[in-house]
Amino acid sequence: MGAGVRQGLNYDGIRKIEIAFPQVEEQSRIAEAIEKDVSKVDALIANQEAQIEKLKAYKQSLITEVVTKGLDPDVPMKDSGVEWIGEITVKHQIYRLKFLLTAPMMYGANESGIKESENAVRYIRITDITSDSKLKDDENNLYLPLDVAQDYLLTDGDVLFARSGGTVGKSFIYRSEFGESAFAGYLIKAQCNTDKLMPEYLFYFTLSSLYEQWKNMIFIQATIQNIGANKYSNLEIVVPSIQEQKHIIEQLTCVCQKIDSLINVKIQKIEKLNEYKKSIIYEYVTGKKEVV
């Protein structure tokens, strides 16, 4: 498969694969042994996956609690006036996103990226943003010539939203440390007015269950899963003062980093268990591990 640009398998290739070939009775015993041993590993993997889901749910509930109730549990609550948001503290206000930005939300470049990075900038596409709002950085990176990218260059703190595809609704904060970058057309840029809204607070809001409810509401109303600039612009956000936003960001960053660290440990355990499962299968099918 490494010999061509288009990687794929067909019958002509598969029929030439050479395999270890024991007698049928032994094949049956090997299959039973593999199933028995692998099922134990699968149970351990399922347990780790369940723990990861619980940690993710806890993280989301914590973020939701903070963005609706703030950091002071003694502050009185009030009706937000928005059904899907419910109650918020008397100190918080509801604003549509478009009133908290320095410019209208903007679509990215409708251009094809290139592999060469000389006289070009990183070209961030919708596929570069992972399901957990991280930026991929690997051999699949693409670039955009600087003269083409000029109108789509990102500045530190710009928030990108995915408007379609498998990651629709996901958000991502661009940082200058990622290197000079432009963004592609299936992403929408929001540039926060930091006198009213901190980018990090907006990002955390998009990790809350409130935002999840809003997305689901948008999807129910549409025939395809797509959130355009107009819908994002009218997203209603719970907004505390800038000072409180900074405190919330500080607190959530500290706690979320600890939760993410625990999740990463469990992901690593799953990877090791999967490697162990492969080794079990390998040893049985090659005869290195005998079936008694």
Image: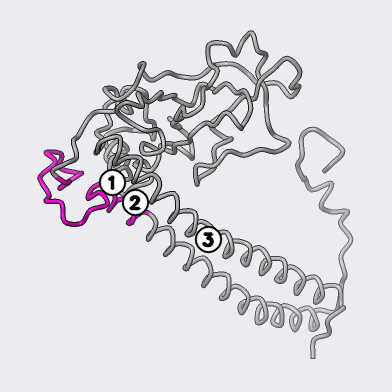
Q: CA distance from mark 3 to mark 1?
A: 22 Å
Name the quadrant containing residue 289.
bottom right
How far apart are the alpha carbons under marks 2 and 1?
A: 6 Å
Q: For this view, does 249 lie left or right of residue 210?
A: right
Chain-order first, disc 2 or disc 3: 2
Q: Is residue 73 magenta?
A: yes
Cβ atoms at labels 2 and 1 below 8 Å apart: yes
Q: Which residue is mark 1?
A: 67
Q: Amino acid at mark 1?
A: Val
Q: Nearer the viewer, mark 3 or mark 1?
A: 1
**Is residue 86 toward the left or the right of residue 199 in the image?**
left
**In the rendered view, does 47 fall on the left or right side of 215?**
right
In the rendered view, would you say 217 is above or below 24? Answer: above
Point out residue 32 in the picture as x, y percentages from the top left corner: 69, 81
Which residue does the image show at 61% across and 32% down from the upper left?
177
Tag 3 residue? 263
